[in-house]
Amino acid sequence: MEEIDMGRYDRNMNMLTKEENERLRNFKVCVVGCGGLGGYIIEMLGRLGIGYITAVDKDAFEESNLNRQILSNVNNLGQYKAIEAKRRMESVNPEVVVNPMVAEFNDKNAEEILKGHNIVIDALDNIQSRLILQDICEKLSIPLIHGAIAGWYGQVTTIFPGDRTLDYIYKNKVQKGIEKELGNPSFTPALVASIQVSEALKVLLGRGDLLRKEVLYIDTYTQEYHKVRF
Amino acid sequence: MIKVKLFATFREGRQKEVYFDYFEGIDGKYILDKLDIKEEDVAIYLVNGMDGKLENPLNDGDTISLFPPVGGG
């Protein structure tokens, strides 16, 4: 294995060991959704030095994304989000390979998109697609880091094959989240994405305590943070 | 007495916690109906901190928690 200049990762030490830092570039992470959550997630994974990131999103940037989606700016409206993720990482950390997939994630293509990754990060924007994501990750035996946002609120959980935690937190066949009424501001995506990335890092490195079989339910309006166990 | 803890948007127009007098057979469905919360709007339903079923009868002294669905990205 070629020696890489670890200078850019100097501030990741000594939180991570040099060996752990080097291991990160061998991991493949699939980020499903490149919007509010996904943009921040890709940014953080890339700066950590995750070697290979698949970025999945069918949409192009529009004006209403500018309030929260870190990959969007006034110059790239109309451009595909997944492609912009790749462009962004080329200027942030060119050592990272970003594989952009301009595609709608659905039950037809899910397996093809997800296979071969060490971990999948849920940055989708609807409940139905998340349930498909859980099913296929389970089938492929890939850990899944779930995150979702709505206005002042958010939630994160780490799902291993067999846990099926989404079955508990989207009970009663709920079809739509409260984000449909509340919208999403700039800060909950960044907050939830940060927690998701910290979970992904721990799963990849095999250390630390995980939000497994428990959901961190976040309320930034009252600053209440509840862990709900299942 | 049944204690009901409400989270996120379920607090709008209500308190963070509400109480119901216990009677035999009281369940989550009854409480949702009285709170004017639709069943399909409840994503997480806990009884004493554990995953629960709305139709199961509650016991005197139980605490239930209601969370709305968060699904955006």
Image (tube, rainbow, N blue to C red):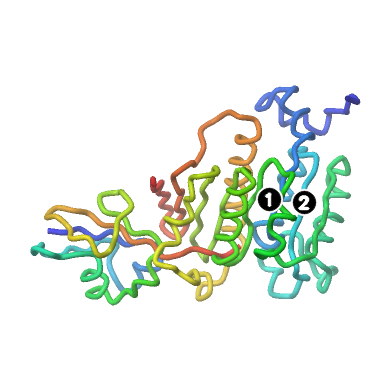
* Residue positioned 58% across, 48% down in the render: A138
Q: Name the residue under label 1.
A: A41
Q: Is residue A158 above or below residue A180?
A: above
Q: Is residue A16 above or below residue A118?
A: above
| Residue sitting nearer the eye, B7 or A19 | A19
Q: In this view, does A160 lie above or below A189?
A: above
Q: Mark 2 points at which residue?
A: A54
Residue lying at the far left of the rendered structure: B23
Quadrant location of the C terminus of chain B? bottom right
* Residue positioned 39% across, 71% down in the render: B41
Residue A199 locus on image (x, y percent): 58, 41
Mark 2 residue crowding within 10 angstroms, few (<14) / some (14–19) / many (20+): many
Looking at the picture, which amino acid does disc 2 mark?
Answer: Thr
| Residue sitting nearer the eye, A160 or A38 | A160
**Chain of the residue displaying label 1:** A
Number of marks in the image?
Answer: 2
* Secondary-structure class at tag 2: strand
* Residue positioned 84% across, 69% down in the render: A79
Residue A198 locus on image (x, y percent): 61, 40
> Is label 1 or label 2 in front?
2
